[in-house]
Amino acid sequence: MVVETSQSFAGQDFDHRLVLWAMRLVGNPRISIRLWNGDEFPVTSDSPVACMEFRDRGAVLALIRSPSLGFGGCYSKGRIEVHGDFLAFANEITAAVTRKHNSGYYGPKLRSLLYALRPNTTVRSKHNVHHHYDLGNDFYKLWLDKRMVYTCAYFDTAEATLAEAQVAKMDHVCRKLKLQPGMKVIDAGCGWGALAMHMAEKYGVDVIAYNNSSEQVAYAREEATERRLDRKVTFVEDDYRTINQRCDAFVSIGMLEHVGLANYKLLGALINRCLKPSGLGLIHSIGRSFPNKTDAWIVKHIFPGGHVPSLGEMMTVFEPYRFSIIDVENLRPHYARTCAAWLQNFESVAGDIEKTYGKPFVRMWRLYLAGSSAGFQSGTLQLYQVLFTPYGNNKVPWTREYQYLENAGGN
């Protein structure tokens, strides 16, 4: 009997040490741990923000083998549970990982260069888009705003709702591009068409919008017809690489993350062909403070083929063609708040989503939305808006004042 008790204590001590070692790998977050046998203990001496429960020892080993894939896979399957505020938990874990791994630069930069060997072909890009965006418009309608905007909002006031902030983002982009009635605009990667229709309706421009998601294009065309904008906006279901029209303004919101680093120079060449010498262009993209590879779990389960660029990597689009960079703005806090709002909306309908897609899907998307908000909150992720023009264009704004004047550039 004494021997069995000693063995029990020895096993318990081993499990505790194993988990604490795993927690050191992710920066010793301020959480508590609950084991499969009910034992609970803190990771640090600080008050825990949440409790992470391991349902079996294999989940601990999976976390050690690959913190990102291990946690994501085990949480989705219910082998890891989080008790408490899930967003607070995600913020704490992400902040801990960021503190631990924020000192490296050259290693991540070299790893990032490997993406140049893995280009997104047109076929692969179509598959990647289908994986994420063709889940069904009804799914996204449940938790996005009524305009179906699935990119960073712009909270120009503290009291702004998500819907108001999305409209403010679209106006912010339009003002930066100095849109005027009669201009021709190319929108590359247009989503469900909200910006394209907003530009046409409020600023009187003609828009050609490209997207290779059949679900999104079908929705956008229907909306444009219903709003009597189908003569001002043309939605093209095709890859951005087929764009060949000339334009006064080029805009791409949330597409660069899916282009792939190997195709950045190709995108720059396309813009160089299309944008008139006096035109303005804007690329809005999730980014990083330094080059690094995209999270393995995100690439496998959420955005296959995705790459989140550093600002230096983004310059690969512009520098070979001598584009003049006019303005760079970082909206990082706005995206943290946007993702938190999406998560809140998602949780309010999680039961309905589970009936259609199942519990693992709900848990996967909860992790994705909370983790994204935490990434922006911690500074692991950035949100860049880069405004540019062809080389030698001197008809550019002298100050940034025009970007913030109410209704500037509109009708």
Image: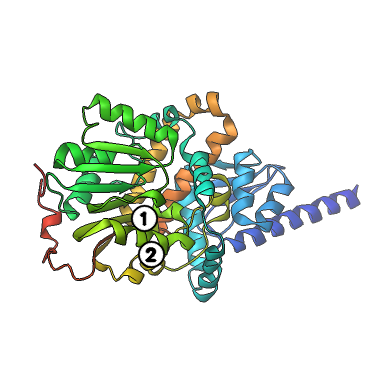
Residue 285, labelled with which disc? Answer: 1
Residue 284, horizontal then vertical, whole percent: 32, 54
Left or right: where does residue 360 sit relative to residue 130?
right
Q: Residue at x 72, y 44 (%)?
A: 56
Q: Nearer the viewer, residue 89 or 290?
A: 290
Q: Is residue 40 above or below residue 399?
A: above
Identify the element where label 1 is drawn: strand
**Quarter of the image that includes the C terminus:** top left
Identify the element where label 2 is drawn: helix
Residue at mark 2: 314
Q: Is residue 335 above or below residue 146?
A: below
Residue 292: in sight, yes or no?
Answer: yes
For residue 215, which quarter of the picture? top left
Q: Earlier in the sequence, mark 1 or mark 2?
A: 1
Residue 76, labelled with which disc? Answer: none
For residue 176, which quarter of the picture? bottom left
Q: Nearer the viewer, residue 143 or 178?
A: 178
Q: Residues within 10 Å of mark 2 (few under 14, many from 20)?
A: many
Label 1 to label 2: alpha-carbon separation:
9 Å
Q: Is residue 309 above or below residue 209?
A: below
Q: Residue at x 85, y 49 (%)?
A: 5
Residue 246, horizontal then vertical, whole percent: 25, 52
Residue lying farthest to the bottom in this orientation? 106
Amino acid type indicated by mark 1? Ser
Left or right: where does residue 61 sit relative to residue 274?
right
Residue 78, horizontal then vertical, whole percent: 63, 38
Pointer 1 with pointer 2, Cβ within 8 A: yes
Residue 359, horizontal then vertical, whole percent: 58, 31
